C-alpha cells in the first residue's frame, strides 16, 4: 500500500528504471491519458498525450475516452477535469500543487462580495477553485475571456474574478467597466519592467510576447498578448526571429521545439532569478507521475453537489468557445 499522506506517493524510484518506458506501459495497461499544461517541465511535456492551455486541457478532459485522466498541472485544472468528466478517475501527481491566483479568492469572502452586488453577473477565470466556479455564472480562460465578456449585453453589470490583471486587460479591450476581484498570479505579477526594457534595448529586433495575467505596465510594452497557446502560435507564425517571453518558462520547451531557428529569451522577474517558474506547477515530477499511475493515487474527488453546481458555468463557457 502506498503512502500519500504528504499529498503524493512518497516512495523512492529505482534510478536505473527507464521511467519514460514504464509510464508508456502503465498508460496502455490502464487506458490512462496524461494531460499536461505548458508550464510543466520538458520531460513531463514529452510523456504527455496532450499539452495545452487551460481551455484546450478542459476540452480534452471533457472529450477523452480514457478511464484515467492524469492531470499534470495544478489542482484547479484537475478539478475542472473531474467536473467535466466525473465518471473518470482523475489523478494528480501532487495534491499540493495549488495556485496563488485561486488562493487569492476564498469562497466565503467571495460569496459576501457577490451578495453586495446582486445585479452583477459573475464571470470567473478558470484559475479558481470549484467552490468559486459554483458561485459563478460563466467561466472563461485567457483564450476566450474577451469573447465571453462580449457575449453579454454592454449594459450588464459584471463581477470579474479572481485575476485583476486579466480583468483590467479585458476591460481595456472591450470598453467595459467590470468590477474586479483583487487577485493575482504570483508568477505573472513579478516581471520586472526595468529589466524587460533593458532587454528590449539590448535586443532591438526582439518582440515582447506576454500573458494577460501580467500587470498593465508590462502589457503596454508587449507586441503580442495572449494565452499560452496563442503566444506559442504567434511565435510559430510571426517572421520575427527573437522573442522575449513574459510568461512561465515551461512554455519555452514547445517554442524551441516548434521554431528551433528562433531565439527565445525568458522575461526576467524582479528578483535575482533569470527566469520565472511557477512553484506549484513545478511540484510535479516524472517520478511522481510514474508512481501516481502505478498506484492510482492521489485521486481527486469532489462531491456530486459541487460537481453539479460548478459544471453549469463551465459548460456555458465551452458552448461559447
Ligand atoms: P492559460 O493556460 O490560459 O494560458 O493560463 C496560464 C496559467 O496561468 C495557467 O495556470
Ligand atoms: Fe496559478 Fe500563476 Fe501558477 Fe498559473 S502560473 S498555476 S495562475 S500561480
Image (cartoon, grey):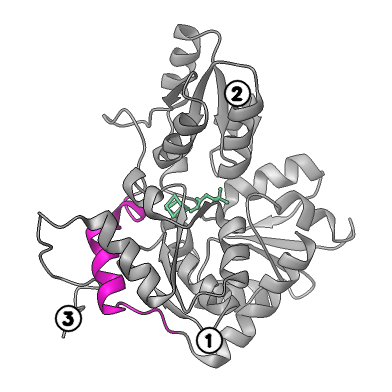
Q: Nearer the viewer, mark 3 or mark 2?
A: 3
Q: Return the residue nearer the eye: 28 or 111.
A: 28
Q: Quadrant of residue 307?
A: bottom right
Q: Return the residue nearer the eye: 289 or 150.
A: 289
Distance from label 3 to label 2 (Cα)? Answer: 50 Å
Q: Quadrant of the C terminus?
A: bottom right
Distance from label 1 to label 3 (Cα)? Answer: 23 Å
Distance from label 2 to label 1 (Cα)? Answer: 45 Å
Q: Residue at x 54, y 84 (%)?
A: 86
The first of marks 1 and 3 along the sequence is 3
Residue 36 % position (x, y): 45, 56
Q: Return the residue nearer the eye: 213 or 236.
A: 236
Q: Quadrant of residue 91?
A: bottom left
Whether residues under marks 3 and 2 lie with C-beta atoms below 8 angstroms apart, the answer is no
Q: Which residues are magenta?
A: 279-301
Which residue position holds label 1? 87
Which residue position holds label 3? 2
The first of marks 2 and 1 along the sequence is 1
Q: Quadrant of the N terminus?
A: bottom left
Q: Is residue 150 above or below residue 251?
A: below
Q: Quadrant of residue 83?
A: bottom right
Whether residues under marks 1 and 3 lie with C-beta atoms below 8 angstroms apart, the answer is no
How dense is the environment of label 2, judged by Cα within 10 Å: few (below 14), some, or many (20 and up)? some
Q: Is residue 239 left or right of residue 208?
A: right
Amino acid at each position: 500500500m502506498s503512502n500519500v499522506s504528504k499529498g503524493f506517493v512518497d516512495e523512492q524510484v529505482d534510478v536505473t528504471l527507464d521511467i519514460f518506458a514504464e509510464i508508456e506501459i502503465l498508460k496502455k495497461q490502464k487506458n490512462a491519458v496524461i494531460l499536461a499544461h505548458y508550464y510543466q517541465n520538458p520531460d513531463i511535456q514529452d510523456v504527455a498525450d496532450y499539452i495545452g492551455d487551460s481551455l484546450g486541457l478542459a476540452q480534452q478532459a471533457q472529450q477523452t475516452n480514457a478511464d484515467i485522466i492524469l492531470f499534470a498541472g495544478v489542482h484547479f485544472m484537475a478539478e475542472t477535469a473531474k467536473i467535466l468528466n466525473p465518471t473518470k478517475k482523475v489523478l494528480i501527481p501532487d495534491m499540493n500543487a495549488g495556485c496563488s491566483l485561486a488562493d487569492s479568492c476564498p469562497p466565503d469572502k467571495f460569496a459576501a462580495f457577490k451578495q453586495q452586488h446582486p445585479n452583477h453577473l459573475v464571470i470567473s477565470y478558470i484559475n479558481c477553485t470549484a467552490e468559486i466556479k459554483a458561485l459563478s455564472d460563466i467561466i472563461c480562460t485567457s483564450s476566450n475571456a474577451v469573447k465571453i465578456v462580449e457575449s453579454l449585453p454592454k449594459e450588464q453589470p459584471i463581477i470579474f474574478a479572481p485575476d485583476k490583471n486579466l480583468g483590467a486587460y479585458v476591460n481595456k479591450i472591450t470598453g467595459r467597466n467590470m468590477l474586479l476581484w483583487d487577485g493575482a498570479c504570483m508568477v505573472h505579477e513579478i516581471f520586472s519592467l526595468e529589466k524587460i526594457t533593458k532587454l528590449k534595448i539590448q535586443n532591438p529586433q526582439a518582440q515582447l510576447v506576454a500573458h494577460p495575467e501580467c500587470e498593465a505596465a508590462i502589457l503596454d510594452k508587449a507586441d503580442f498578448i495572449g494565452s499560452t497557446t496563442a503566444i506559442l502560435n504567434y511565435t510559430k507564425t510571426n517572421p520575427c526571429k527573437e522573442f522575449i517571453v513574459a510568461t512561465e518558462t515551461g512554455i519555452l520547451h514547445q517554442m524551441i521545439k516548434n521554431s528551433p531557428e528562433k531565439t527565445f529569451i525568458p522575461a526576467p522577474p524582479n528578483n535575482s532569478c533569470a527566469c520565472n517558474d511557477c512553484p506549484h506547477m513545478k511540484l510535479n515530477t516524472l517520478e511522481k507521475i510514474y508512481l501516481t499511475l502505478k498506484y492510482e493515487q492521489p485521486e481527486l474527488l469532489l462531491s456530486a453537489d459541487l460537481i453539479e453546481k460548478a459544471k453549469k458555468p463551465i459548460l456555458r463557457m465551452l458552448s461559447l468557445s
